[in-house]
Image: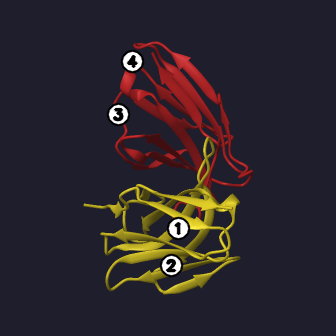
């Protein structure tokens, strides 16, 4: 158990809908990361927050957004969902903004039908 | 551009053998590398890391080798066990001074299968 908690573990939703994925980082970790894993793209970095502020952005679609709250938990919002958004979404956390090990949660399986 | 290159090869070994998983990276600015293990239905699990000022680091049954000259990283697993069966990813981070912060770039993964 990495200490990173993600909810929900699985969800199925229809195209055009909006979902929110939630992440609680390891105790004491200030950085939160979101990654998307799909069969064709592998593990892709989406976005990083550090102590509430966005610090790095990857190939995150404009339909997706994230935030980190004062209690350091984070949410990833996915809107206007398309079939191609079906993937495993991972949250990860680390103590600092860079240069240290990143620990992953178990992921949220999203299926868009 | 930034990339850590694995072409999803498959490595099949017998229990007790040593395994070597390879990874090529392309960004000379990367200064921190991590190996992760991912079992089916689970998140990537940290195995071992190495910084660019080192060329070798050992853990429990695992060794990571870094060759910056040819931009190559390898993971050696000693006395491989069936429980080691998983997908293994290398990842790189561009460190201090860049704007990538904690962003990791992952390779495509290698499937390791250990036969009893």
Alpha-carbon distance for marks 3 and 4? 11 Å
Q: To which residue does mark 1 refer?
A: B34
Residue that mark 3 sits on: A61
Q: Earlier in the sequence, mark 3 or mark 4?
A: 3
Q: CA distance from mark 3 to mark 1?
A: 26 Å
Disc 1 is placed on an element classified as strand
Report which residue position mark 4 lands on.
A80
Question: Callout 4: residue from which chain?
Answer: A
Point 35% across, 58% down: residue: B7
User: Could you say where residue B26 lies in the image, as x and y percent from the top left?
Assistant: 30, 69
How packed is label 3: few (under 14 Cα within 10 Å), some, or many (20 or more)? Answer: few
| Residue A102 visible in rendering | no
Quarter occupied by the C terminus of chain B: bottom right
Q: Nearer the viewer, mark 2 or mark 1?
A: 1
The image's mark for residue B51 is 2
**Callout in the foreground (1, 4):** 1
Within 10 Å of disc 4 (Cα), the crowding (few <14, some 14-19, many 20+) is: few
Chain shaded yellow: B
Q: Are marks 2 and 4 in contact (CB under 8 Å)?
A: no
Mark 2 and mark 1: span between their CA atoms? Answer: 9 Å
What's the chain of the residue with tag 1? Answer: B
Q: CA distance from mark 1 to mark 4?
A: 34 Å
Chain bearing mark 3:
A
3 and 1 marks on the same chain: no
* B62, B103: nearer the viewer: B62
Q: Chain of mark 2?
A: B
Sequence-first disc among 2 and 1: 1
How far from the left and from the top, in percent, is residue B35?
54, 66
Q: What hue represents chain A?
A: red
The label shown at residue A104 is none
């Amino acid at each position: 158990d990495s200490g990173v908690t993600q909810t929900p573990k699985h969800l199925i939703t229809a195209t055009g809908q909006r979902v929110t994925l939630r992440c609680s980082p390891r105790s004491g970790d200030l950085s939160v990361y979101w990654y998307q894993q799909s069969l064709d793209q592998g593990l892709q970095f989406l976005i990083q927050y550090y102590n509430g502020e966005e610090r790095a952005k990857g190939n995150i679609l404009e339909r997706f957004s994230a935030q980190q709250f004062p209690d350091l938990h984070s949410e990833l919002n996915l809107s206007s969902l398309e079939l191609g958004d079906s993937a495993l979404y991972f949250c990860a956390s680390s103590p600092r903004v860079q240069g240290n090990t990143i620990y992953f949660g178990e992921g949220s399986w999203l299926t868009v039908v | 551009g930034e990339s850590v290159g694995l072409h999803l090869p498959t490595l099949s070994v017998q229990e007790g053998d040593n395994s070597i998983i390879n990874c090529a990276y392309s960004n000379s600015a990367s200064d921190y590398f991590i190996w992760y293990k991912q079992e089916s239905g689970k998140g990537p699990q940290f195995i071992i890391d190495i910084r660019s000022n080192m060329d070798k680091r050992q853990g429990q049954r695992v060794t990571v080798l870094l060759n910056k000259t040819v931009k190559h990283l390898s993971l050696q697993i000693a006395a491989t066990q069936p429980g080691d069966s998983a997908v293994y990813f290398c990842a790189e981070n561009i460190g201090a001074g860049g704007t990538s912060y904690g962003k990791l770039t992952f390779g495509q993964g290698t499937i390791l299968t250990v036969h009893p």
